[in-house]
Amino acid sequence: MSKTVVLTGIKPTGMPHLGNYLGAIRPALQMADEENTEARFFIADYHSLNSVRDPATLRSYIHEVAAVWLAAGLDPEKVLIYKQSDVPETFELTTILMAFTAKGLMNRAHAYKAAVDVNREKGQSDDHQINMGIYTYPVLMAADILLFDTDYVPVGKDQVQHIEMAQDIAGVVNHNYKKDLLVIPKARVDEQLMTVPGLDGRKMSKSYGNHIPLFSPEKKLRKTIMKIVTNSQGLDEPKNPDTCNVFALYKLFADVAEQKVLAERYRAGGMGWGDAKVALFEKLNAEIGPMREKYNSLMADPSQIDAILADGSARARKVAAGTIRRLRDAVGVS
Ligand code: TRP
């Protein structure tokens, strides 16, 4: 039986936060560990080029994001990790897919529409600061996915439309050539882990400024956790764990027995918010601490990262070459 292919792309845009770790990184790595699964995780660096225009910044984002995934437990022996820009077959497939992608489909992309809306609000022309990379973003993303005969794409809710567009485009190609040339991918959204609360209780997001960076020095992490907003109940008062931001985060790292113990301390009274935050910090640091060390050692010598990515790209290109041969044959250019 052939293995299920799970693929996801990671846009290098700076240090991920705890919400990214819990909502994307940790579940994707768990999925990669499932039986009969072939996992492929890549760094979508050309997707970032649409907005990151400084070469040193882009280079360091690429190293950072690769180091984060490796530190979080990605085993490059088992999971293929590579850089999109190192697999030129992606761009050949993009060109092929362009011919089958309705312009109207791109007009409907949420991210593009949001950019147009911002322009209208500001009284700018619709096209202001929108480049073709942004406009055709979903086609490049479809190529990333379809190039590897992907069955499942683990993504957040915001990316589901892009997967539907990849399905749509692949369907048009298959229909035209009357065969299953491209595997129709499915999105896998982990509903349970969708909302990780930030410091103020709203969804954790860099744009809200309420995020906890995944790897900051231990002292800084502790300080950040101390900033989590709680109510003004005094030390002695019994507290409700179910309405508390600190407890909500604790739950995402602790097992059921540990959750029960802390919940009892809340309800009993005599535990201040500082104590709850220390409990969270310790739990968090126990999981993140060893990863932080690995991250720091990779970043201290990024040539280790480059070697892993180079090896991954070489292996990825072998798979990609097969798909491109199939497509070239089918369309009639070979
Ligand atoms: N668009 C995705 C994001 O913003 C990144 C991405 C690019 C991706 N290509 C992909 C995700 C292919 C899944 C599959 O996060």
Image (cartoon, rainbow, N blue to C red):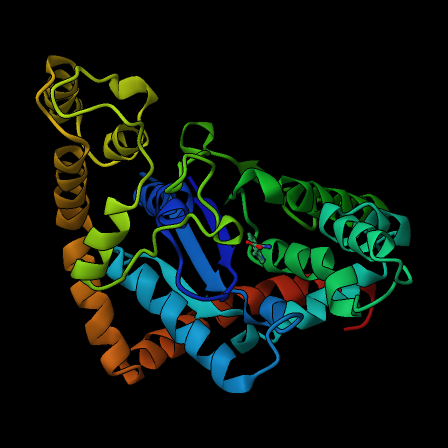
In terms of image quadrants, where is residue 159? top right
Rendered residue at 47%/63% (across/down): 42
Q: Is residue 268 visible?
A: yes
Task: Find residue 60 and report its horizontal and vertical position in percent.
Answer: 42, 78
Q: Is residue 10 above or below residue 255?
A: below
Q: Is residue 108 above or below residue 76?
A: above
Q: Quadrant of the N terminus?
A: top left
Task: Find residue 48 and report its horizontal and vertical position in percent.
Answer: 59, 69
In terms of image quadrants, where is residue 274? top left
Does residue 17 appear left or right of residue 6 in this picture?
left
Q: Is residue 185 visible?
A: no
Task: Find residue 90 and report its horizontal and vertical position in percent.
Answer: 63, 68
Q: Quadrant of ligand 1?
A: bottom right
Q: Nearer the viewer, residue 55 or 137?
A: 55
Does residue 147 appear left or right of residue 257 in this picture?
right
Q: Nearer the viewer, residue 287 or 34?
A: 287
Task: Find residue 240 and report its horizontal and vertical position in percent.
Answer: 25, 16
* Number of numbered discs overlaid on the protein picture: 0
Q: Nearer the viewer, residue 170 or 130?
A: 130
Q: Quadrant of the C terminus?
A: bottom right
Rendered residue at 78%/53% (across/down): 118
Rendered residue at 82%/43% (across/down): 175
Does residue 205 appear left or right of residue 80 in this picture?
right
Q: Is residue 27 above or below residue 16?
A: above
In terms of image quadrants, where is residue 247? top left
Rendered residue at 68%/62% (across/down): 140
